Amino acid sequence: MHSRVEPTEYLFSYGTLQQEAVQLAAFGRPLEGMKDTLIGYKLVMVQVADQDFIAKSGASYHRNVQYTGDSSDTIEGTVLSVTRKDLEQADAYEPFDYKRVQVKLKSGLDAWIYVYSDQ
């Protein structure tokens, strides 16, 4: 029986998931990634309500992205190659008041990002 390789997904990180220590804690291994840019978004600070995440991170305010639609608004970051299982682990890592949405990066890749959702 051949082992099946999981399809690659892409996760764009503009924050802590770019750090190897965070990747090791969240995924159990360092992730492969390359620099990329998110266009039409700007960085904002949001207050996270997830007390477990605040305890893990040591802060209640975190950077997040906000859609502007303005092509002059860009965010530099890293696009990480992940599996579907990795995405589930990332979902568990991120605060409960963040949601995962798909975007197109400057490189043309379709990638997931986490955005604050107050709903």
Image (tube, rainbow, N blue to C red):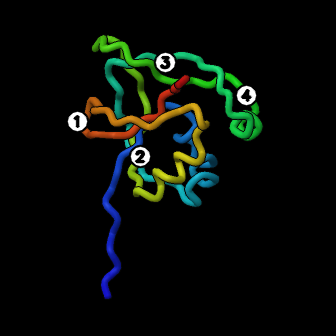
Quick one: SS at disc 3?
A: strand
- Label 4 crowd (10 A; few <14 / some 14-19 / many >=20): few
Question: Which mark sits nearer the N-terminus, 2 or 4?
Answer: 4
**Image quadrant in which the N terminus is located:** bottom left
Q: Are marks 2 and 3 in contact (CB under 8 Å)?
A: no
Query: Which residue type does callout 4 highlight?
Result: Ala
Q: Residue furthest left?
A: 108
Q: Is residue 89 above or below residue 52?
A: below
Query: Which residue type does callout 1 highlight?
Result: Gly
Question: Which mark sits nearer the N-terminus, 2 or 1?
Answer: 2
Query: Which residue type does callout 3 highlight?
Result: Leu
The answer to whether residue 119 is left or right of residue 66 is right
Tell me the residue that label 2 is attached to: 80
Question: Which mark sits nearer the N-terminus, 4 or 1?
Answer: 4
| Cα separation between marks 2 and 4 | 24 Å
Tell me the residue that label 1 is attached to: 108
Q: Are marks 4 and 1 in contact (CB under 8 Å)?
A: no
Q: Are marks 3 and 4 in contact (CB under 8 Å)?
A: no
Please count the marks in the image.
Answer: 4
Q: Which mark is residue 43?
A: 3
> Viewer-nearest of labels 4 and 1?
4
Quick one: SS at disc 4?
A: loop
Residue 111: % across, % down: 34, 40
Tell me the residue that label 4 is attached to: 59
